[in-house]
Image: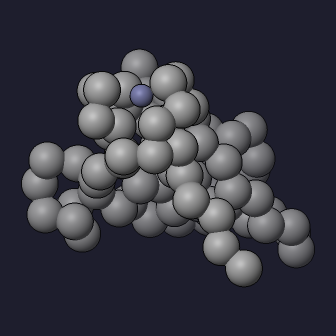
Amino acid sequence: MQWQLKCPACGIEEVEQGAGPDHEAVTVHPDRDSHGSPLGTRGGYVSVELTCAAGHGFDFVVSNHKGAEFVGVVPRT
Ligand SMILES: [Zn+2]
């Protein structure tokens, strides 16, 4: 099973990671119950900085909290 991300702003499929090396686009945020993820979930999450070919920036976020796993995209402001 797989899903291909599209830009949440314009819907195109041509999406790239940040301008630097691939590994620098990925950030692991440690689990802290008092902090929320960009998806609104509590606990740890991983975010990947992405930009579409038209220049829209957004983060792909994978989070988990107490046995539930979430994936989503959040526009970067
Ligand atoms: Zn776009």
How many discs mark residues in the rendered view? 0
Horizontal and vertical percent for residue 22? 22, 65
Position of residue 13 in the picture relative to residue 19 (left or right): right
Compared to residue 12, the image places residue 33 above or below, namely below
Q: Nearer the viewer, residue 34 or 6?
A: 6
Residue 42, placed above or below residue 8: below
Please indicate, yes or no, whether residue 58 appears anywhere in the rendered image. Answer: yes
For this rendering, which residue is in front, 53 or 74? 53
Q: Position of residue 15 (x, y in %)?
A: 36, 47
> Residue 60 location in percent, x, y?
52, 50
Which residue sits at x=79%, y=66%?
Answer: 69
16 displayed left or right of 6:
left
Compared to residue 41, the image places residue 24 above or below, namely: below
Kindly identify the residue that appears in the image at 66 percent across and 48 percent down.
72
The outermost residue toward the bottom is 1
In the rendered structure, the answer to whether residue 32 lies left or right of residue 28 reads: right
Kindly identify the residue that appears in the image at 29 percent across and 51 percent down.
Answer: 16
Give the colour scheme shown. one colour
Q: To which quarter of the image does residue 8 belong?
A: top right
Relative image position of residue 38 (x, y in whole percent): 61, 39
Question: Which quarter of the rendering shows the C terminus?
Answer: top left
> Could one spot residue 29 in this view of the protein?
no
Q: Is residue 23 above or below residue 7?
A: below
Left or right of residue 15, residue 35 in this image: right
Name the residue at 44% across, 65% down. Answer: 28
